[in-house]
Image: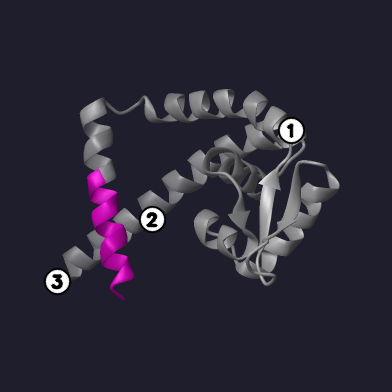
């Protein structure tokens, strides 16, 4: 492991981190204009596209610490955007379900959200996007080994 290779790996990490931060800030600006925060949006988007989810599993699916899920779900419930449902087969399990009001909000926000992401990524050709997808998967799988 040469010093040059270490420097290059560090540079790549910094460039990747800064690119993610810049893109995330742009995407989050639009979400926050709709009176919800990015975490609330992620929960609603998950429920909208994947259906009811056990509260215990939401954190892992949207990359959020499990302790924060209760707080986010409480806020969304107070806003009338989701509701809790007890599992009829297992009393230990509670599901989150998006409400009609939550569906209307996601249906309003999501098309512009995905268009915004498309525009951010349009600097890359289709082939470049596919290459990045494969390379980032490779890096992610390597990181999971540690």
Using the image as rendered, state which of residue 145 and residue 1 is in the foreground: 145
- Residue at 51% across, 26% down: 116
Q: Quadrant of the C terminus?
A: bottom left
Horizontal side of residue 76 vs 87, given as left or right = right
The magenta region covers: 134-146
Report if residue 143 lies within the magenta region: yes
Which is more N-terminal, label 3 or label 1? 3
Rendered position, 126 above or below 14? above
Is the residue marked by circle 1 packed among few (<14), some (14-19), or many (20+) residues within 10 Å? few
Q: Magenta residues: mostly which secondary structure?
A: helix
Residue labelled with disc 2: 14
Is the residue marked by circle 2 packed among few (<14), some (14-19), or many (20+) residues within 10 Å? few
* SS class, disc 3: loop
Image quadrant in which you'd find residue 132: top left
Residue labelled with disc 3: 2
Q: Position of residue 76 (x, y in %)?
A: 77, 48
The residue sitting at the front extreme is: 89
* SS class, disc 1: helix
- Residue at 27% across, 58% down: 139
- Residue at 43% across, 26% down: 118
Which is more N-terminal, label 2 or label 3? 3
Horizontal side of residue 38 vs 127, given as left or right = right
Marks 1 & 3, CB-CB < 8 Å contact:
no
Q: Position of residue 41 (x, y in %)?
A: 64, 42
Q: Position of residue 143 (x, y in %)?
A: 31, 67
Q: Position of residue 99 (x, y in %)?
A: 73, 39
Measure the C-alpha gap from mark 1 to mark 3. Answer: 57 Å
Residue labelled with disc 1: 100
Measure the C-alpha gap from mark 2 to mark 1. Answer: 42 Å
* SS class, disc 2: helix
């Amino acid at each position: 492991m040469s010093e040059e290779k270490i420097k290059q790996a560090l540079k790549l990490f910094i460039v990747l981190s800064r690119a993610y931060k810049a893109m995330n800030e742009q995407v989050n600006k639009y979400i926050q204009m709709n009176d919800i925060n990015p975490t609330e949006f992620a929960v609603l988007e998950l429920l909208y596209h994947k259906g009811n989810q056990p509260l215990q599993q939401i954190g892992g699916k949207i990359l959020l610490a499990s302790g924060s899920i209760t707080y986010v779900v409480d806020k969304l419930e107070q806003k009338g955007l989701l509701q809790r449902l007890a599992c009829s087969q297992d009393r230990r399990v509670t599901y989150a379900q998006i409400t009609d009001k939550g569906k209307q909000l996601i249906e309003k926000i999501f098309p512009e959200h995905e268009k915004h992401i498309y525009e951010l990524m349009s600097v890359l050709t289709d082939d470049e996007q596919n290459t990045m997808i494969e390379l980032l998967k490779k890096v992610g799988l390597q990181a999971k080994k540690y």
